[in-house]
Image: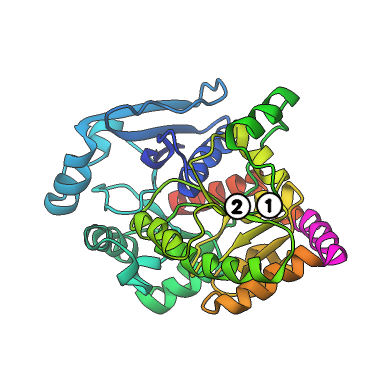
Amino acid sequence: MRIGITVDDGLSSIAGGIGQYVRSLVKHLASIAPDDQFVLVYARARGVRPFALPSASNISWVEIPIPRLLLHRFLWPLLGKPLIESFTGPLDVLHITLTTTRVPTQVPTVVTIYDLFPEKYPDHFKPSGRFFRKGLLKQAKEQAHAIIAISEATKHDIVELLGMTADSIAVIHLGLPRRTAPPSTLEAGFIRRYTLQQPYILFVGRIDPRKNIKALIKAFSQLRRKTKDPYLLVLAGSNGWKAQEVRRFVERLGLQDSVRFLGYVPDEYLSSLMRNATVFAYPSLYEGFGLPLLEAMAYGIPIAASNISSIPEVAGPAANYFDPYDPTDICRALVELVEDAPLRVTLIEEGHRRLANFSWERTAQQTLEVYYRVAGER
């Protein structure tokens, strides 16, 4: 079988959750299905190039020789052309992993929908992004042969908000990113680079409104008055929409010396950053899945997390939950973990057990089964 996969979101040097999904899925698909051919398709963009993959004879790359902005913001969404197979050649199945544009095609399609945050909370998302997503979601509803949702929570939203039938949606969870422990030289380099000698509460994720960072900062301000230790709040992630508002909020509260913005943290330092944290805080208002939760479990950090969306589905009993709309309740959950050593140990142990439910091998195998089902329906 010849399977096309759009991989634009996996090409960024700063790969967020969707980028990790694309990279890890492709890597494991190629490994478990050596007799199938995987055609990885992306639009031309400055500074992007194919990501590293193990050498495999069943992978080929196709760069569409059209600038990504022109293709994704004009030709495909507004004109509905050119067909993607005019660049890839014949395909049996096309897997669309993009988030904001439809892809003109005449072959059976599988569409991954990560979340419906822009549709549930339009005020927290750029209007331009919402506009272009409409075409992709219309394609998913009217033309896709199968939908992959990355959590039961996302599946529920697809049924409720888009009116799709539940039996057309396959829930396929994500896996744990495999990261090796850093050598001691990198551990020392991490400490020198980020100067995090004080104990700290850690958040990892893009700095944008959906992550609810302002509420976490309010809770942290309360925590500083309740604990004797001089904790830092460390925010690790690239800037998203309205990130500057978060920085100004910190200044208004007079917390510049206690709240650290690290920006995007390279993989070689991420494990040190997480392993040295006292608590991992995840106050999101909405998540399609929440890969950082798995990483926190893997690195043995107790988790304080929102009690809504997909987060309890992923973290299960491995988190101390709070109401993300109530900074006082967020503070309560943080203080409990800071002060209760037995609770921290319990959550860490639960996290290690929980990880057995998530693997990229399983994700790839279940995705491959969707491809074969769709191809068999032609």
Residue 190 lies left or right of residue 236; in this view the side is right
Q: Check the image and report above or below for 66 versus 222.
A: above
| Figure colour scheme | rainbow
User: In percent of the image, x 64 and y 42: which residue is there?
Assistant: 196
**Number of callouts:** 2
* Residue 179 picture location, percent across and down: 66, 36
Front position in the image: 21 or 111: 21
Q: Check the image and report above or below for 130 versus 364.
A: below
User: In percent of the image, x 53 and y 64: which residue is there?
Assistant: 217
User: In percent of the image, x 54 and y 66: which residue is there?
Assistant: 216
* Residue 222 picture location, percent across and down: 60, 72
Q: Is residue 349 magenta?
A: yes
Q: Alpha-carbon neighbours of circle 1 within 10 Å: few (<14), some, or many (≥20)?
A: many
Q: Amino acid at mark 1?
A: Ala
Q: Is residue 91 magenta?
A: no
* Residue 13 picture location, percent across and down: 43, 33
* Residue 205 picture location, percent across and down: 51, 52
Q: Amino acid at mark 2?
A: Pro
- Residue to which mark 2 is pinned: 292
The answer to the question of whether label 1 and label 2 lie on touching residues, with beta carbons closer than 8 A, is yes
Is residue 33 at least partly visible in the picture?
Answer: no
Per the model, the C-alpha gap separating discs 1 and 2 is 6 Å
Residue 74 lies left or right of residue 23; in this view the side is left
Q: Secondary structure at mark 1?
A: helix
Q: Which residues are magenta?
A: 340-354
- Residue to which mark 1 is pinned: 296
Q: Secondary structure at mark 2?
A: helix
Q: Check the image and report above or below for 337 versus 52.
A: below
- Magenta region, mostly helix, strand or loop? helix
Front position in the image: 135 or 332: 332
User: In percent of the image, x 71 and y 51: which residue is there?
Assistant: 199
Q: Check the image and report above or below for 151 versus 53.
A: below
